[in-house]
């Protein structure tokens, strides 16, 4: 009885091994009858939305005087922006932030002796978001005009965006897919074969960099906001069957 079971198990093992080898050979055969190519899609475009942020500041010995300074500066900023064609609804002023300022005190031999209150620092942040990229960009370059009016202001460089990125992405997928098919077609023809259907397809990372820049691509995808003119790039890795 034990011998019968021994031969049965051995026979089953042989059947499984033969099946596994057959599957491996089939997979290898199929893998050898495909072409894997990477297609590229690129395009350049100009941003249609700009976001610029500034910060009005004031220093005073008492809060009330500081608030008056901030309000005066705010009114000057509003008038200036209106003169430059920036509508009031495009400008958002946030709450006024108040911080107490202190200076450290030391004894004659350099030991810490506490700190002395020196006054208040107030600040109010504002943000401009507009599709009039040219107008806001011009304002951001001429911030010195506000400083000349006595406005204590700090500002960062504008951020540039594009509101139709979904359309750009779809177009690039089509372009990259067509490019991949062209490459695969040439490979198949050179090999004396005919191109079949798609076995698999995988989209690469969507990259947006500044146009004519040396920005490096990121594994997680680049998203440039510092350049008005941008370049978008996407790849498609496609596996085709060959006949």
Image (spheres, helix red, strand yellow):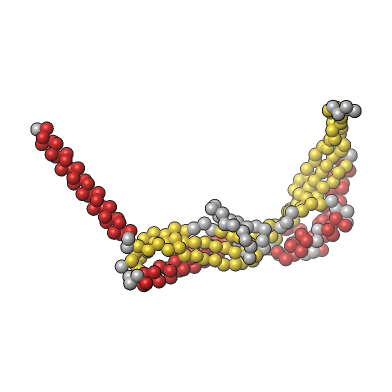
Quarter-wise, where is residue 9 in the image? top left
Whether residue 79 is visible to the viewer of this picture, yes or no, is no
Residue 51 pos. (x, y %): 70, 57
Residue 139 pos. (x, y %): 78, 61
Quarter-wise, where is residue 206 in the image? bottom right
Q: Nearer the viewer, residue 25 or 104?
A: 25
Identify the residue at image location x=86%, y=29%.
Answer: 110
Q: Is residue 36 left or right of residue 43?
A: left
Instruction: Name, please, the residue furthest toward the left.
Output: 1
Residue 223 pos. (x, y %): 60, 56
Residue 132 pos. (x, y %): 71, 64
Q: How many marks overall?
A: 0
Q: Is residue 194 left or right of residue 111?
A: left
Q: Nearer the viewer, residue 87 or 106?
A: 106
Identify the residue at image location x=88%, y=57%.
Answer: 148
Identify the residue at image location x=83%, y=37%.
Answer: 101
Whether residue 158 is visible to the viewer of this picture, yes or no, is yes
Identify the residue at image location x=82%, y=37%.
Answer: 100
Q: Is residue 97 left or right of residue 38?
A: right
Give the quarter of the figure containing the N terminus: top left
């Amino acid at each position: 009885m034990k011998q019968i079971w021994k031969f049965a198990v051995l026979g089953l093992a042989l059947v499984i091994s033969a099946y596994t080898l057959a599957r491996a050979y089939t997979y290898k055969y199929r893998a050898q009858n495909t072409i894997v190519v990477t297609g590229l899609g690129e395009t350049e475009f100009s941003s249609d939305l700009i976001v610029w942020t500034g910060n009005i500041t004031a220093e005073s010995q008492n809060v009330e005087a500081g608030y008056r300074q901030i309000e005066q500066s705010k009114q000057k900023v509003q008038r200036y922006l209106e003169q430059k064609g920036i509508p009031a609804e495009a400008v958002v002023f946030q709450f006024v932030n108040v911080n107490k300022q202190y200076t450290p005190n030391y004894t004659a031999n350099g030991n810490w002796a506490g700190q002395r209150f020196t006054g208040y620092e107030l600040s109010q942040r504002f943000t401009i978001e507009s599709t009039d990229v040219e107008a806001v960009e011009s304002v951001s370059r001429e911030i010195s005009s506000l400083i000349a009016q006595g406005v204590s202001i700090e500002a960062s460089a504008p951020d540039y965006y594009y509101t139709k990125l979904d359309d750009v992405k779809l177009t690039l997928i089509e372009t990259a897919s067509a490019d991949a098919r062209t490459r695969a077609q040439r490979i198949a023809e050179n090999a004396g074969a005919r191109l079949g259907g798609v076995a698999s397809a995988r989209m690469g990372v969507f990259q947006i960099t500044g146009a004519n820049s040396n920005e490096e691509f990121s594994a997680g995808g680049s998203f440039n906001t510092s350049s008005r003119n941008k370049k978008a790039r996407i790849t498609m890795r496609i596996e085709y069957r060959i006949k």
